Image (spheres, grey):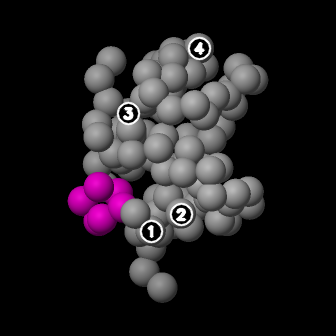
Amino acid sequence: MNYPDEFKKLAFDVLTADILGIRSLEGIRDHILKGLKPQQRQRLELYLMETLDGHMSDKEINALWDKTGTDVMFHRPAAARNFLLKVQDWLAESDKPL
């Protein structure tokens, strides 16, 4: 399965957050979201909806994440899915008007 550039950007933003020592979920969220333009957010949100709709196993989602080429790895079976669901929530929340 191919993924959009925004998915790879997400993976590298997570890696960058780790390198910068950002450890809190709020800090990681802010780091990821600040680098996305509205169109990129929309494409990533759509891609995550399609990817996380239940047709892919946790193993397939981990393999998809591993293809991004970052050193960020998820060691528990559902960890990548859970993280991507969290990112999906962040994107949905950031779309809401204040």
- Residue type at numbered disc 4: Lys
Of the image marks 2 and 4, the number of the one nearer the N terminus = 2
Q: Residue 52: horizontal and vertical position, in percent?
A: 49, 32
Rendered image: mark on residue 31: 2
> Which one is nearer the viewer's eye here, 32 or 58?
32
Residue tagged 3:
50
For the record, the magenta segment spans 36-41
Q: Residues within 10 Å of mark 1 (few under 14, many from 20)?
A: few
Looking at the image, which residue is at 73% across and 23% down?
75
> Which one is nearer the viewer's eye here, 53 or 76?
76
- Residue type at numbered disc 2: His
Q: Secondary structure at mark 4?
A: helix
Rendered image: mark on residue 59: 4
In the shown orientation, is residue 48 left or right of residue 72? Answer: left
Residue tagged 1:
34
Alpha carbon of mark 2 to alpha carbon of mark 1: how far?
6 Å
